[in-house]
Image: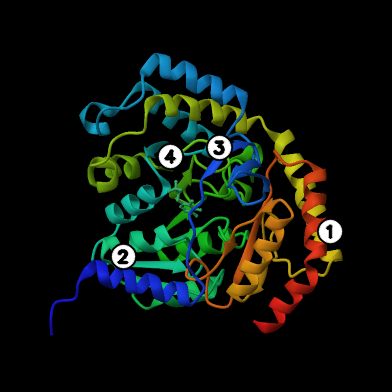
Amino acid sequence: MPRPELLARLAERQAERERAGLLRRLRAVEQAQGPRVRVDGRELLAFCSNDYLGLAQHPELIQALQRAADDCGVGSTAAHLVVGHHREHAALEEALADWTGRERALLFSTGYAANLGAQQALLGTDDLCVQDKLNHACLLDGARLAGCTLKRYLHADVAGAARQLATAPQAAALVASDGVFSMDGDLAPLAGLAALCAREGATLMIDDAHGLGVLGPRGAGSVADAGLAQTDVPVLMATLGKALGCAGAFVAGPAALIDGLTQFARSWVYSTALPPALAATARVAVALARRSDDRRDHLAVLIARFRTGAAQLGLPLAASTTPIQPLLLGDSAAAMRAAAALEARGLLVTAIRPPTVPEGTARLRITLSAAHGEADVDRLLDALAEIVPPLRAGEGSA
Ligand SMILES: *Cc1c(COP(=O)(O)O)cnc(C)c1O
């Protein structure tokens, strides 16, 4: 047998994906004004960003970034342990620890890198990692990178998590879950997972990428919303690129965790620090998010309005109280048709298909933002009403 040629094999996989109707298409946003974006020369109203509080283009943040660029330039020039760690990073870490009620916090360049680094630092080949089946891809990849045994449980099933922990009662164990599930918008059974971990001597890690800024007192996240503290959830991860409207991520927890990460988390040690100007901007975003109860209240009004309207239309709503409001259509072709029909009406909602979501659960992942108005939600509902018959057809064929 001749050696397979890698690029040819990749092209073949792509062709296969295209035949299955699962090819991804990359599109460039030409201009954005909040949720109003120009794509391919057309103005569209988007319902698919993660800018839940509408901060990505907030004048205060833009001004903070401009000022900080004057002050600290663009690049951080190195990894944190070399000469890349700026006092702006340290100040942001303090602000994040304070907000989330943790002893310390450590910045990473992305949430993906944070999850890889934290799990790889904590877990070794003899250890066990127990995860929800619907966890974000990078939580799963982190466990794979760590080389530990990875066991998954059915979505939000605490008893299932207990059974998986019991498969290796002697092993050091991490239980990891999204706080708010990224494609479904529902909440993890946080109190149940915390009680399980306390009982079984396992460590709980929560990825709160979609909860921070949105849920909890002063937006402190899903863990604070559940009334849980650092002792219940020692490893808390969240990102700065969603509700905070910036980029980057952090892990927060006890000093022993953070100190250990600075020694052993390879995605932190061997990676260039975030631009310090961005850290300065994110600190302004944290302050803004903490005092944004008005934005969270407005978001709650939009969520209720959307759910009431969608229920009246008989749409297949998910059990979500967060800004993530997926419409499950089942079959990928139905999801693509629905997205195209919305786009023809000036609305942008990207269809989410396998392998991002399980087979048979393709959907429109509708997200709401405090930057939307009630009239925007009504426009979305009107458009959905017009395409209801094809949506139902998609449901039937799933
Ligand atoms: C977006 C996301 C990440 C990755 O964060 P990035 O900063 O975009 O790399 C991690 N976990 C969850 C649940 C996410 O939704």
Q: Position of residue 281 (x, y in %)?
A: 49, 26
Q: Which circle's residue, 4 or 1, is located before the other in the chain?
A: 4
Amino acid type at mark 4: Gly
Report how far apart the C-alphas of labels 3 and 1 lie in the structure.
28 Å
Q: Residues within 10 Å of mark 3 (few under 14, many from 20)?
A: many
Residue drawn where x is 36% and y is 33% of the image:
274
Identify the mark at residue 248; answer none if there is no mark: 4
Residue under label 3, please give it: 244
Q: Position of residue 221 (x, y in %)?
A: 58, 45
Identify the mark at residue 144; answer none if there is no mark: 2
Report how far apart the C-alphas of labels 2 and 4 lie in the structure.
22 Å
Q: Which circle's residue, 3 or 1, is located before the other in the chain?
A: 3
Residue under label 1, please give it: 309
Q: Relative to 330, does residue 213 appear above or below in the rendering?
A: above
Identify the mark at residue 51; answer none if there is no mark: none
- SS state under label 2: helix
Q: Residues within 10 Å of mark 1 (few under 14, many from 20)?
A: some
Report how far apart the C-alphas of labels 4 and 1 lie in the structure.
35 Å
Residue drawn where x is 39% and y is 51% of the image:
112
Q: Which circle's residue, 2 or 4, is located before the other in the chain?
A: 2
Amino acid type at mark 3: Leu
Q: Relative to 321, does residue 171 appear above or below in the rendering?
A: below
The part of the image, by quadrant, that contains residue 352 is: bottom right
Q: Which circle's residue, 1 or 2, is located before the other in the chain?
A: 2
Report how far apart the C-alphas of labels 4 and 3 lie in the structure.
10 Å
- Circle nearer the viewer, 2 or 4: 4
Contact between labelled residues 1 and 4, with CB atoms less than 8 Å apart = no
Q: Position of residue 157 (x, y in %)?
A: 55, 72
- SS state under label 4: loop
